[in-house]
Image (cartoon, rainbow, N blue to C red):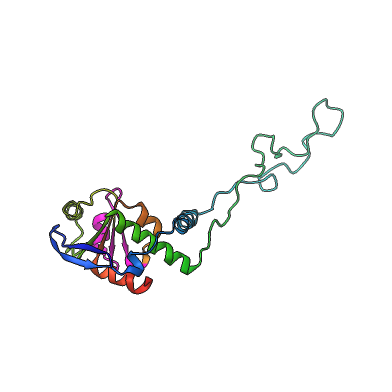
């Protein structure tokens, strides 16, 4: 079982904690990590961009001039694509960019992501992340104590409004509850700061 240090929010070492091999000590599957990241980024796309075709723009209900005899090129509508204010040809239309991935594959990818953080020494386990009131300065101080100032992902067992409100204005810092952790955020974080209770919660779900 991999072992990591257990800290408090003051940055003091309280001892060591053993992590489950089945979650934090697996073989890293790069292919699954790639698929999970592609899925996450694709699913963030709204797909709401839209343009109007010649059938949707207003106007152009009649032929602008007769077919022959004017010396000009024949035209059927002033809303054809070559006209100003005409319709768009092959423009974007609303679509669904969602990419599906089996649940077991998603879980396996998350295990690989967590293991990679342990291997790189970027997993910081805290006994508890207690903040009495939303204060950005307090989060900055705590992350400084834990040497996790740059691009930290803070994971708590359950949603903590004080932690979320304190960290939401900090660039590069994200918060999440254990049940909502995703592969992209784990890999994108410089340090994964996770509470001891959140570790146990992930081990119960992923083991």
Q: Residue at x 33, y 64 (%)?
A: 25
Indicate left or right for 73 with 2 as reference: right
Residue 157 in view in this figure: no
Image coords of residue 153 (percent x, y): 30, 56
- Locate the N terminus and report the quarter of the image it occupies: bottom left
In this rendering, the count of numbered labels is: 0
- Locate the C terminus and report the quarter of the image it occupies: bottom left
Image coords of residue 22 (percent x, y): 36, 69
Indicate left or right for 177 with 35 as reference: left
Image coords of residue 82 (percent x, y): 69, 34
Q: Residue at x 20, y 55 (%)?
A: 139
Indicate left or right for 58 with 201 as reference: right
Residue 159 among those drawn in magenta: yes
The part of the image, by quadrant, that contains residue 132 is bottom left
Q: Residue at x 21, y 67 (%)?
A: 17
| Residue found at the very far right of the displayed protein | 69
Q: What range of the chain is rendered magenta?
A: 154-179
Q: Residue at x 40, y 56 (%)?
A: 184
Residue 30 among those drawn in magenta: no
The part of the image, by quadrant, that contains residue 175 is bottom left
The vertical placement of 59 against 204, above or below, is above
The vertical placement of 171 against 118, above or below, is above
């Amino acid at each position: 079982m991999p072992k990591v240090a257990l800290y408090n929010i003051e940055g003091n070492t309280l001892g060591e904690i053993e992590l489950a091999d089945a979650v934090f000590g697996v073989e890293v599957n790069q292919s699954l990590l790639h698929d999970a990241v592609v899925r996450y980024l694709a699913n963030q796309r709204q797909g709401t961009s839209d343009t109007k075709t010649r059938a949707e723009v207003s106007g152009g209900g009649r032929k602008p001039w007769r077919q022959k005899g004017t010396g000009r090129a024949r035209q059927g509508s002033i809303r054809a694509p070559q006209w100003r204010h005409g319709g768009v040809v092959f423009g974007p239309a609303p679509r669904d960019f969602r990419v599906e991935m089996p649940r077991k594959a998603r879980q396996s990818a998350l295990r690989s992501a967590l293991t990679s953080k342990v291997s790189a020494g970027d997993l910081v386990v805290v006994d508890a992340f207690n903040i009495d009131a939303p204060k950005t300065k307090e989060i900055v101080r705590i992350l400084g104590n834990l040497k996790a100032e740059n691009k930290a992902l803070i994971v708590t067992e359950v949603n903590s409004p004080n932690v979320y409100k304190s960290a939401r204005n900090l660039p590069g810092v994200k918060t999440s509850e254990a049940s909502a952790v995703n592969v992209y955020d784990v890999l994108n974080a410089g340090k994964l700061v996770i509470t001891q209770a959140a570790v146990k919660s992930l081990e119960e779900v992923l083991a």
